[in-house]
Structures are given as C-alpha cells and as structure tokens.
Amino acid sequence: MKDLLESGEPGQPLREIKVLIAVPEEYLGASTGELQLLDGWITSMEAHQSSVVLAATLPAANYSSVTSAGRSSTAGRGRVDLAEG
C-alpha cells in the first residue's frame, strides 16, 4: 500500500452497487444525510403514498453500513435492498 501511495499511480477503482432505499417521508432528510456520509449519491427519487423510494449508488464496501444506518435513522421503518441491473 505504501508503494502505491508513493508512486502516485491510481489504484483499483471502487466497486459500486445500486440500492433502493424506502423511507417514510418524515425521515427523508436523515436518510439522505446518512447516504452522503457513506459516499453515496441519489440517482432518482419516487414518492409512494407516505414513503419515498430512493435509488442510489454507493461504494460496495459501504453496503453493510448503509443498511444499518438506514434502519437507525428511520427508527427501524426504512428498508434497503440491492437494485437489479
């Protein structure tokens, strides 16, 4: 690792995954904030009755963190699933 940092050469690109995050509307701000902290970005947003479904992309290494953060920031009412495709 030290050799790679000293050489200035780029390393392997991060593997990214796509996720769908369903959250109640009242927790939308907290959920998007958590997503940003985990280096994720929202690609689309859809409203469904009293919830919002976010399509997002994030580094694969942060997937387990986003699932636990999604539950904690929504008092257990949010859900994170891998997106198809």
Image (tube, grey):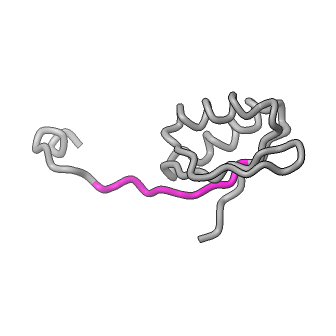
Where 42 falls versus 82 (above or below)? above
Total labels drawn: 0
29 left or right, relative to 10: right
- Image point (56%, 52%), residue name: 43
Q: Residue furthest left?
A: 7
Write the residue at 67% across / 49% down. Answer: 45
**Residue toward you, 32 or 69:** 32
**Where does residue 71 sit, x and y in percent of width and height?**
76, 37
84 lies above or below 24: below
> Looking at the picture, does residue 15 appear above or below residue 37?
below
Left or right: residue 43 versus residue 53 is left
Residue 84: image quadrant is bottom right
Counting from the top left corner in percent of width and height, residue 76 is at 83, 36
State which quarter of the image contains the C terminus: bottom right
> Residue 39 at what x, y percent from top left?
48, 39
Q: Quadrant of the N terminus?
A: top left
In the picture provided, is 78 more to the left or to the right than 8? Answer: right
Q: Is residue 81 magenta?
A: no
Which residue of the protein is positioned furthest toward the right in this rendering? 49
Q: Picture quarter containing residue 77?
A: top right
Judge whether residue 13 is colored magenta: yes
Q: From the viewer's perspective, is 76 left or right of 43?
A: right
Q: Quadrant of residue 3?
A: top left
Magenta stretch bounds: 12-21
Q: In the image, what residue occupies the spot 66% across and 59% down?
A: 82
Residue at x-position 59% and y-position 48%: 63
> Which is the main secondary structure of the residues drawn in magenta?
strand
